[in-house]
Image (cartoon, rainbow, N blue to C red):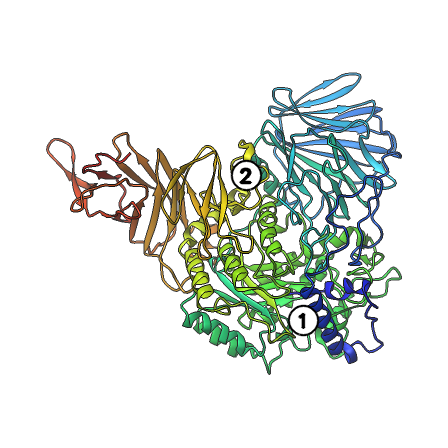
Amino acid sequence: MALGTGAVLMLAQAGPALAAPDDPDAQRGAEIEQLQRERQERAKSGGDQQGTQDQPLAAEAKEWPDPTGALPHPENPLDKEALPTLAVSGVTATADGALFDLGGFVGQVRLFTDDLAKVSVRAKGKDEFFSPGIVKRDWEPVEFTVEDSATTYRIITSDLTVEVLKERFGVRMLDAAGNVINEDDMRYGSGYENGKPYVVKKTDPDEDFYGFGEQTRGLNKRGESMRMWNTDNYSFPVTAPYVYATIPFFYGLKGDGHAYGIFFDNTHRSYYEMASEADDYYYFYADGGDLTYYFFNGPSIADILTRYTELTGRQPLPAEWTLGWQQSKWGYKPGQRLVEIAQGYRDRKIPLDAVNFDIDYMDEWRVFTWNEEDFPPEELDAQLEALGVKSVTINDPGVKVDDNYDVYLQGNDLDAWVTGPNFTDYIGDVWAGSSKFPDFTRQDVRDWWGGLHGRLLDRGVEGLWLDMNEPAVFSEPYHTAPIDVEFNHGTQQHTEVHNIYGFLETQSTVQGYNQFKPGVRPFILTRDTYAGGQRYAALWTGDNVSSWEHLALTIPQNSNIGISGIAQVGNDIGGFAGTTTPELMARWMQVGAFIPFSRVHYDNTFQEDQPGQEPWAFGPQVEAIGKRYIELRYRLLPYLYNAYRDAELSGEPVQQPLIYQFQDDANVRDIDDQYMFGENLMVAPVVTEGQRSRSVYLPAGSRWTDWWSGSTFAGGQTITRQAPLGTMPLYVRSDSIVPMREVQQHTGEKPLTDLELHAWVDGSASTLFYEDDGWTHDKNQGEYDETRFTATRSAGGSVRLQQEVVHDGYDSAITTVTLKVHDVPRPLPAAVVGKVTQPRPGVMRPDGGITAKTLPVTYDADKRVATVTIPATTTEPVTLQFSGRSGALR
């Protein structure tokens, strides 16, 4: 949902802040209306422009203008004139690397694999640091050798050499051939400056940077100044330095195409100057905490992501219904309105899987309660279930201070709350008024909080949506709890916990979901997270704006988040704040059908004259466009589900920047308005108002086919594609098989009985098709099917399909496989366009051969597609042969 604190505190700079009244509840309604009026004015004026935030930081002054009040204190620039010199006075070999005596500090290099090293510097006597983002700490021993000299200490594996400089402590990384991949800039080195851990690295002018989780601006981060401090930033500018999630993991892509990764595992507010000050160095640092980072040697981005998600965990395969379309709004009230919206989708035969309940369903915004009069849960659940629609309810961490509220009283009994520096409970103002906040750093609090979710899940709720979990606070001058609040019985400070608060809440929420729905795959959607958060929740990018700039921003945002480990990511389709237009909504639904998580969400709570953002809200033309693309998403669900399976197994993102697959093609490095959707489909949206054609770059190394026209193009070139309002350019790469199915009105409406395999074959195309029940954990006990389909084109033009059962553990409903071979050339005879030869197992001829049977083939001359349907039980190869005036398929 989330209006969040941005509406309060961003505006506090333009006028008087809203003071917390003596009786918060008495004035709450008036305050909310005031906030809404102010928000409307901001939306009309294009949102908060935040001063000069689109300008690079000056090297000598590291402070952003701060009209949001989002910072706990002014930014702390790294004083490069006061950096200490740490020298190695002794080395102690260890079983997995070495320890370095640095005077009052100890340096450490640990090898986890032959391509992954951990580098840390900490005060002597302090334990090695692992954040909650790390899921794997125990690794198999790595074989390595050591070379020790007066100036360096080298730890050498088969793929990576870590060279530690002694005179001034610094680290250099080399590949197996001895080439320098990455190195500290020894003018500055690494260490601590006034308590701030820092690392300064050399860079080449042709090196680019990607990742960094949720950030604004474009895809390539070279030349950017970035910040990580999770911030409730309502209607954030497209250049805002502070947004909702922190993932301090990035890639360096060198000019020769070699990639490396660095994960700066620090939960404090952190800063990234990526060649923003000079062309020969970059650096990162944090306000506090330990100097700890992990170095990943590629050379491919895909290899690095696989290793990173081995370290921090992978996105579990989500329930299939979460891949469908969802509809949401802040202001669907009473609850019957949600049923009407769901019925509106059904009446128009537009697929829909879920509706979202925003904060209105609660009893006076008390979490874990229901407004039974307006939102009777069992009645609404029954009506929605009858339509095949699931419900997702929002939840916030703030608990209303109310002696008649049992959740509050339970928390008091447990001493569950975040405290002030004097050990009294911290109280801040959120939607329900004066509230306390659970201390999620404590396992006993996470257990208690998780156990409260039965109040939602036992009443028909299938998904949980976590908002305001930065944590956002209305009544503070900094958007969040004061910097001096404490956690974990006073042993941890807000500076350390802030960026992982929402992460820990998602951990607790998954625990509760599993408690009340054992055996069912949880769906948790969060606005706030830290590295490794993919283990627990999907991410949406917060309170965006109904503008063309925000539509364009979704592409680099989602792409960088994807290669930062979070596969299930999405944005509020149509924009949350402000008013969309018919053209913008049409284009956004096209993009929205091709992102990992698809949900329309918008805010017009106090603007009932504002148009809705349902597909039909802007008339029949926009409705038809939305329906076309939503239906296409549902046809592609087998392909999308298999992409999520790849994410579970290897960390491969569902939405991929072009550099993920084509990092050797220098032309894709700065393309942030195209992306891959899974392995085989390339999306090139229109994100500019009034545009009816666009340039599309086709990456080298593949042939590309226009999804709509069937026209084919060689890679390594830029073409111009016409794009009328109803068309979003979409391409499929050569040697691809894309599994599809018939349209459903919701997932699970119809069993998958006929699997369509769309094949574009130049040489050989293969796909490993995965199938399970779509919603339980039974797959973890082997209850799934995997079938490898391989299509091969012969020199004579025939196409041979081989089906191989790799794993057989699920009772599939598939009875037929329909093979559709694309790019079959014209002309072919109208009567007999070809034949499929299928060996008949067990019927042997006297000469030892196998009797064959012929299956009917159809040919669409306009689309150049040949189609044949094959029994799913076929185990022998099937050959599709073509004859006629055109000769063989070429």
Q: Secondary structure at mark 2?
A: helix
Residue for point 60% across, 76% down: 608
Q: Residues within 10 Å of mark 1 (few under 14, many from 20)?
A: many
Q: Residues within 10 Å of mark 2 (few under 14, many from 20)?
A: many
Q: Are marks 2 and 1 in contact (CB under 8 Å)?
A: no
* Residue 575 screen position, x and y as percent: 60, 61
- In this rendering, the answer to whether 88 lies above or below 581 is above
In the image, taking residue 811 as reference, residue 847 lies left or right, namely left
- Tell me if residue 490 can be seen: yes
Q: Secondary structure at mark 1?
A: loop
* Residue 613 screen position, x and y as percent: 54, 67
Mark in front: 2 vs 1: 2
Q: CA distance from mark 2 to mark 1?
A: 41 Å
* Residue 831 screen position, x and y as percent: 16, 46
- Give residue 422's quadrant in the image: bottom right
Quick one: 343 or 809, which is closer to the camera? 343
Checking the image for residue 310, the label placed there is none
Q: Residue furthest bottom?
A: 373
Task: Tell how many labels.
Answer: 2
Q: Which residue is mark 2?
A: 660
- Tell me if residue 410 can be seen: no
Quick one: 723 or 57, which is closer to the camera? 723
User: Mark 2 is on which residue type?
Assistant: Tyr
Which label's residue is closer to the chain start, 2 or 1?
1
Quick one: 149 or 305, which is closer to the camera? 305
User: Mark 1 is on which residue type?
Assistant: Val
Q: Quadrant of the N terminus?
A: bottom right
Q: Quadrant of the C terminus?
A: top left
Q: Which residue is mark 1?
A: 367
